[in-house]
Image (cartoon, grey):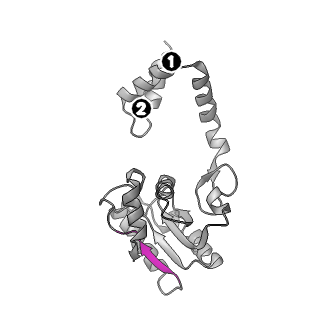
Amino acid sequence: MNDPIGELIALLSRLPGIGERTATRLAFYLLEADEELSKALGGSLSTLHRDVQRCEECGNFTSGERCAICLDSRRDASLLCVVARVPDLVAIERSGAFRGRYQVLHGLLSPLDDIHPEHLPFDQLVERVERDGVREIVVATPLTVNGEATALYLGELFEGKDVEISRIASGMPHGGELEFTDQITLSRAISGRRKV
């Protein structure tokens, strides 16, 4: 027997941070809300992967070939912030403390999970640094084992080159994710970054 409510609850509960109880509440909210909301939500979800892609320059999500940050001529192209994921970039942008550009790795080095340097866009990063005359790379990976390993690798990758490597300052909770950090803490971490 077809169970559209049960199917919706099961699908919603697969989203991060959404348990079965929250998924149930959302499903019944949608049933009781204006039908146009459900149609708009369904339409947006059905075209998401078709209409959104990675920026060819930095890896941010965008609807065009390059994202708004890369197209913004007011941004400092000589200052590059390396983040693990797009939500980290969004969190730093919300802080208002960084006016450079970004490189999104879409992951972190993790030998235990078989994620090695060749699996991340380090070649693209090196090319950007040379092409754009980057003078400083701010490493804003999480303060986790994999985030630290990635930061150390970046320090080694650019050792002896004419670019300064800095790491976001403490103030970030150890093991914490940038996406869930408050704006003041994140702003202080960016402002107080240190060399790797």
Q: Residue at x 43, y 67 (%)?
A: 190
> In this picture, which residue range is highlighted in magenta?
163-169
Res 13 label? 2
Q: Secondary structure at mark 2?
A: loop
Question: Which amino acid is tagged 1?
Answer: Leu
For this orientation, the residue located farthest to the left is 174
Q: Residue furthest top?
A: 1
Asked if residue 29 lies in the magenta stretch, the reply is: no
Q: Residue at x 36, y 69 (%)?
A: 169
Kindly identify which residue carries mark 1.
31
Query: Could you tell me which residue is drawn at 48 percent across and 68 percent down?
Result: 117
Instruction: Determine the residue positioned at 35% across, 26% down.
Output: 21
Is residue 17 placed above or below 184 in the rendered structure?
A: above
Front one among 23 and 166: 166
Residue 165, magenta (yes or no): yes
Q: Is residue 171 left or right of residue 16?
A: left
Outermost residue on the right side: it is: 65
Q: Secondary structure at mark 1?
A: helix
Is residue 7 among the parts visible in the rendering? no
Q: Is residue 131 visible?
A: yes
Distance from disc 1 to disc 2, alpha carbons, whole Å, reads: 16 Å
Q: Nearer the viewer, residue 151 or 68?
A: 68
Q: Which mark is residue 110?
A: none
Q: Quadrant of residue 71?
A: bottom right
